[in-house]
Amino acid sequence: MATPISLVLIKFTLFLTLNLLFTSQPHEVSCNNDTDRIALLQIKNCTTNDPDGFFSSWNDSLHFCSWPGVQCSRHGSDERVTSLDLSELDLVGTLPPQVGNLSFLRFINIENNTFHGRIPPQLGNLVLLQHFNATGNSFTGPIPANLSRCSKLRILMLSSNKLRGKIPVQLGSLSKLEILRIGQNNLTGSLPASLGNLSQLVNFGAAYNNLVGRIPESFGRLSKLSIIAAGINQLSGEIPPSLYNLSTIHIMTFTFNKLEGRLPENIGFTLRDIGYFAVSENDLVGSIPESLCNASRLVDINMNMNRFAGRIPNCLSKLQNLQLLSLQGNEFSGRIPDSIGGLKRLFDLDLSRNRLEGPIPASLGNCLSLTSIDISHNKLSGEIPAETGKLTHLNTMDVSHNNLSGEIPSAIENCESIERLFVQRNSFQGSIPSSLASIKGLRELDLSCNSLTGEIPQQLQDVKDFQYLNLSYNNLRCEPSNVLLDADMVGRVSDFGQARLLVSSEEDDTFSRSSASAKGTIGYAAPG
């Protein structure tokens, strides 16, 4: 039989148990709600500049779930912060470690502010986090390795900051990650092979860093990858063959690296969805595979400044979506294919600084969308086709440094949008078409180093809006009364058939082009 003391102890224990049972839950709710509120206020307190007063209503006059940029959802009887959007507010400050106490947070967007300091490693406590966008800030230090603890993370965007150090190997454990953007930082080291484990990855960007080493072969396992952008680094070695086999890739850019090797012969069959292919400024060799013509969704091809050689494939005309074709600074030879005239959507063509020869195809006049043509520094011969006059959207035309001859076609006056025309260092003959002066937008004109004769058209002398004009090294005449003009122009003109010149015959046009911002008048060089 229980003693009176025992009964008292039993009753007292039962009282304490019941009291704790009915009072502990409210205390827990209060604590959790207060934790979220305190964490938000700490973010406000760590902001040193709020030009639009965004945080002015973050006070006790409103429940924190009603504060701007904050969204909550109910968890049991609690309202917890699940979303924080502070994007594009010109805020200046740091991100405090207390952000890691917002334990139900799923979405953080602080894009395009000036948050600085380190990304707090406490973000790794946010096990429900799915979206973290800190693009366009001034964060320094490393990418926190324990972001890998955010196992539900689908989007991680840290581009355009000042982050340093290596890409954490641990990020390869984020099995649900779909977007990883870490470009425009100061990251070093190599691309971790562990990133090849990101089986859901669709978009990967690491351009504008200081990354070195090879592209991991494991990237070929990224079976959902659509975008890979790792240009402007110091990556070396060959692009892994397994990467070319990813039929899901739409954008592949590896510009300004130290990559070498050849393009695979079947590239157009394996990368069947490729739309943007950019590998300029590397050390790639070989020819353009004919199979590339089967990649019918191609919009941009940029292969500048490599050591590609051989002929430009005739079949490129099959690429009916192509808008940019840039093969500048390689070793391509042979003719510009006539079939190029079938590229109806092409607006930018750059074949300069190769070894191309033969005539400019008249079919180029069928590329009615063209805004820029640069075929300079080749061995092209023949005349400028009159069909170029059909290119009414053309803004820039550069055929300089070739072996072109004949007269400058007056049909160019129909190129009503042209602003820059460069035909220097060829063998053009005849007179300067007076119709050039009728092109209202013409701002830069270089006809130097040809065999042009006759008088400089009065209409051309009367143009007031030239930023750059070079007629030197021809056999041109001009009445002295018409030479000294009051227009703002850069002019390098000889003494119109006399021996004395205003520029050295050894001067390269690089200097002439770079001086387009200088001002002066066309002057007469007296014989002397």
Image (cartoon, helix red, strand yellow):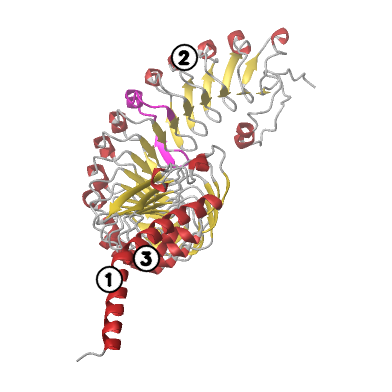
Residue at the image point whose x is 35% and y is 27% from the top: 364
**Can residue 259 be seen in this snapshot?**
no
Residue designated by label 3: 148
Query: CA gap, disc 2 to disc 1?
Result: 95 Å
Q: Which residues are magenta?
A: 352-372
SS at badge 2 = helix
Residue designated by label 1: 18
Q: Position of residue 329 (x, y in %)?
A: 46, 45
Q: In the rendered view, would you say 220 is above or below 51?
A: below
Q: Residue furthest right?
A: 528
Whether residue 363 is in magenta: the answer is yes
Mark 2 residue type = Glu
Mark 3 residue type = Ser
SS at badge 3 = helix
Per the rendering, the mark at residue 413 is 2
**Quadrant in which the C terminus appears:** top right
**Quadrant in which the N terminus appears:** bottom left
Among numbered discs 2 and 3, the one appearing first in the sequence? 3
**Can residue 376 be seen in this snapshot?**
yes
Q: Answer left or right for 413 relative to 246.
A: right
Comparing 327 with 379, the one in front is 327
Comparing 483 with 212, the one in front is 212
SS at badge 1 = helix
Whether residue 255 is in magenta: the answer is no
Which numbered disc, 2 or 1, marks the residue closer to the eye?
1
Comparing 455 with 179, the one in front is 179
